[in-house]
Amino acid sequence: MRKILITGATRGIGKAICAELAADTHILVGGRNAEAVANLVAQLPCASPFVADLLSEDEVTKACAEISELDGLVLNAGIGFAKTVADTTRAEWTEMLLTNVVAQADLTRQLLPALRATRGQVVAINSGAGFNAGPGWAAYSASKFAFRAFTDSLREEERGKIRVSSVHPGRVDTDMQIALQESFGRAYNPADHLRPESVAKAVRAVLDATPEACLETVSVRPA
């Protein structure tokens, strides 16, 4: 049975990916809240915890040290907020880039030997904001543009060793999306957004690609 680590696994898109893969995958449930991770592990047929605050290099190093082989890494953890450049502080820029880019890159670096051992896959959950930026989205889009650059470079550096894919959902019906739309003062209608389960099915398609194929960039948007 393949072993796949999913970060940010305890809610939203991450939890939907866990449910989608549960039948045929040993899932490493990634999260920083040990209780939430344990609760989800108990609900899945074959799972184990991966508890670490991705902003803590020591915690990540300790958690990764126990993994010698890994078939897949789904980089789903991240944060988002909407603010104009004029209102975004240095601390907020730093938090966004550390969380959405630096932490993801370092986790991947530490797990590369385990992924190479199985000719595994990295699937980065990016965003439509990784292609386009607009008013109020400078910090978030900058992090997602950088995240896309990271995956594009990693794909070429590791070509023939591991496969690297980038999945770009449009607006998804999650707690984060509700908060984002509220920050703009907009009415929220779940039907206007993708379901997390739809994104999870796209991730399965990427992970289930035959060994000679790589779905390099996948865009999933509301119909």
Image (cartoon, grey):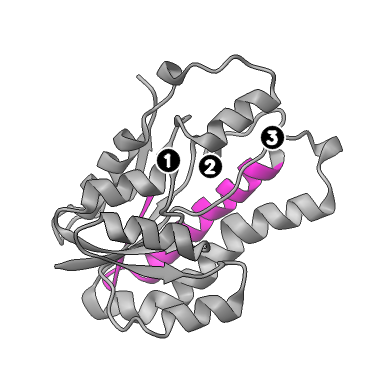
Please tell me how crowded label 2 is: few (under 14), some (14-19), or many (20+) other residues with Cα within 10 Å.
Answer: many
Q: Can you identify the residue that label 2 sits on?
A: 130
Pointer 1 and pointer 3: residues touching (CB < 8 Å)? no
Looking at the image, can residue 153 be seen? no
Q: State the residue at coordinates (39%, 27%).
A: 194
Q: Which of 143/177 is in front?
A: 177
Q: Is residue 143 left or right of residue 67?
A: right
Amino acid type shown at disc 2: Gly
Quarter of the picture holding the C terminus: top left
Q: Is residue 71 above or below residue 213?
A: below
Quarter of the picture holding the N terminus: bottom left
Q: Which of 43/211 is in front?
A: 43
Q: Residue 37 at what x, y percent from top left? A: 42, 61
Q: State the residue at coordinates (84%, 47%).
A: 89
Pointer 1 and pointer 2: residues touching (CB < 8 Å)? yes
Q: Can you identify the residue that label 1 sits on?
A: 168
Q: Residue 208 at what x, y percent from top left? A: 17, 53
For the record, the magenta segment spans 139-167
Verify whether residue 151 appears in magenta. yes
* Element marked by disc 1: strand
Q: Can you identify the residue that label 3 sits on?
A: 82
* Element marked by disc 3: loop
Pointer 2 and pointer 3: residues touching (CB < 8 Å)? no
Would you say the magenta stretch is mainly helix, strand or loop?
helix
